[in-house]
Amino acid sequence: MTKSKTQYPTVERDISWMYFNHRILQEGRRSDVPLLERLSFLGIYSNNLDEFFRVRVATLNRIAQTDKKSIKQEADQAEQTLGEINKLNTEYIKEFAETTDMVIRSLEEQGVCLLTDKETDEEQKMFVRQFFRDKLNGTTLPLWFKGINQMEDEEDDAIYLAVKLSVCDEEKEDKQKKKLKKDYALLQIPVKQVGRFLRLPDKEGKACLMWMDDVVRLCLPWIFAGTEYNHFEAYAFKFTKDAEMEMENDMEHSKLQKVQKGVKSRKNGVPLRVLYDKDTPKDLLKIIKEKLNVDKLDTILASGRYHNHKDFMSFPDCGRKDLKFAPMTSIHLQQFAGKESVFDVIRREDQFIHVPYHSFDAYLRFLREAAVNPDVKSIKTTLYRLAKDSKVIESLIMAAKNKKKVTVVIELLARFDEASNIKWSSKLREAGVNVVYGIEGLKIHSKITHVETRYGCYAVIGTGNFHEGNAKVYTDCMLFTAIKPIVKDVERVFEFIMSPFLPMKFSELLVSPNSMKPALLKLVNTEIQNHRLGKPAYIRMKVNHITDPDMVAALYRASSEGVPVDILCRGNCALIPGLKGVSETMHIRGIIDRYLEHSRILLFCNGGDERCYIGSADWMPRNLVNRIEVLTPIYNERIKKEMAYVVEAGLKDNVQARIVDGKGGDHLPELGDEPPFRSQAELYKHYMEAEKG
């Protein structure tokens, strides 16, 4: 717990994130979660942690290592935070190892076995040898450590084997073998080419799999064929690099060129976390550390035999659908599936979808119709992240070929998707689309689409990316509207992106960095004033992160005045509920379930005339100050009630919603006499019943 600039007690951002990721790890321990889903949660936990170290811990390292006296206080705080992170990480890594062993043992009891190279029988070894000849040979290319200066060019999202090779006297017993000669090599596991797990022939009615690490271990004699070595030991390790891109401030280069160079510079990032097999011999470990050039602030942890557990997210199900969540097929809404023009449907009444409960096809239908409808004059949209085979891109290209004026704002600095976005922007430009890369120093995170027709304009405002893949696993809301003031504001946002230095006012939308933060503070203060006057007052909200000091202070003020503050917060949360005289009326819950909670919904009582907003912004400085974000009011009473129900269902959840206490406890609520209520299952049921009528 730390004191913020406003003197309220807060949880440091990165410590709060560690608590959040631990909630994901806890899902892996739950006996009421299907086994393959538990394994997937372990993969998500591992993947999140890798990205956290690549981004947040890397930033803290840079601050801690600075020698500038002007930020000494920040440097000291960063070093302290790094110490707390490492302490929690050491604690959690033990829990992760125990949980992984427990889940793998339980899978074996269910007939799904993950074998080591030592546990395979002769038939399975023959299968592995054939696999080596057919698929693996040529993809496993070792490097001699003595030829490597520093491992700065190696990928940090890969898994490596450090191999110790020896020439041994084979005539003597193992313990008496004399190693006549030795050398050391580096070998990357070719996961991208062949996957992380190999399905072996079944044994005694059980599905058998093997880590690709162990497949490679078995194949070392063939990989090093032609050398004199006859004895091999291989130990896995992985490292995480600083993922910050080096962006040149060169006026002669375009933003596209700068990002392209920045993506290349990321490959040369400094390693700052190393995980290695605890059984690695000292001589081999010394070489690994030297080649990675690690220092005292870096995290170096002895771990188990296997790393990069993020691959658990793609673990083969071996046909065992009974070990996964029962399918919840997305609902195709009738108003977006018929022959009637979607523009007529939207003009008659605002529409909404809530993915993945509702199908993302509704938005694709909107785009497709815009692309072919002869009355459509122009399409503008923002794109932050895109699916691998994006139907959104296909529709926009089709629109351009159909002589529509298409403008696409692509955010090149969507972290880890920069290269993908550069590729898509090139494809769009080739098709005649006007591609805009946004504003230097002001990331475009808003999710908006504007369509102009001869008979009026339409807009879509969402809480998440226009991404078919995300829409299957992220909960996000989209408003489809023809309300003129809102649609006009959406058009103004695009004008602002094109000309960011011109003064721009918005009548309906809350837009950062212009008006959003002052407007949100005013909404909170209205609830405080109404409570003082004896009027109805409350704040209910669903966001991903709350760390902005001013917004944190405003929520504390509201709670200290007695305003009920109920929050669903998935990730970083600086608030500590239940503090006497400060946050006694504040309740916070974080839902971890089959879908990633991603929608942002804000509800303010407003004296009984409830105000509702949805949009792209979390309550963090980056969203409110350093990005272009959009929140839209919801005026349609039917949709407003639906948004309120989404928040209400989450707050009522007593199965998957953990109580966020600001201390990392984050326990599940006790059921008592209340029946179980799982919000994601109840929302799906609710939407199914609504569609049936």
Image (cartoon, rainbow, N blue to C red):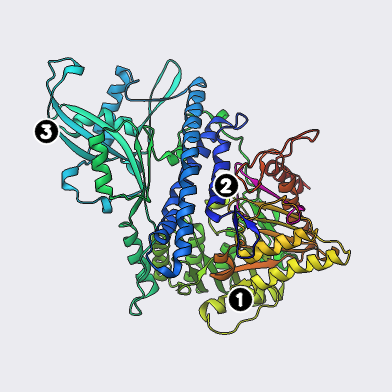
Q: Residue at x 58, y 31 (%)?
A: 34
Mark seen at residue 416: none
Q: Is residue 352 above or below residue 318?
A: below
Query: x%, y% of residue 409?
Result: 50, 70
Residue occupied by mark 2: 20
Residue bearing the label numbered 1:
514
Kindly identify the residue that appears in the image at 40 percent across and 40 percent down.
308
Residue type indicated by callout 3: Gly
- Indicate the quadrant where residue 63 lies: bottom left
Residue located at (66% from left, 52% from top): 576
| Disc 3 target residue | 226
State the extent of the magenta-drawn residues as a range: 581-599
Labels 1 and 3 touching (C-beta < 8 A) = no
Q: What is the C-alpha distance between the residues marked 1 and 2?
A: 30 Å
Q: Is residue 585 located in the magenta-colored stretch of the structure?
A: yes
Secondary structure state at the residue bearing disc 3: loop
**Residue 477 can be seen in this image:** no
Q: Nearer the viewer, mark 1 or mark 2?
A: 2
Looking at the rendered structure, the kind of residue marked 2 is Phe
Horizontal side, residue 481 vs residue 641: left or right = left
Residue 656 appears in the figure: yes
Q: Nearer the viewer, residue 272 or 255?
A: 272
- Are the residues tagged 3 and 2 within 8 Å (C-beta)? no
Separation of marks 1 and 3 at Cα, in angstroms: 67 Å
Question: Extreme bottom residue here?
Answer: 502
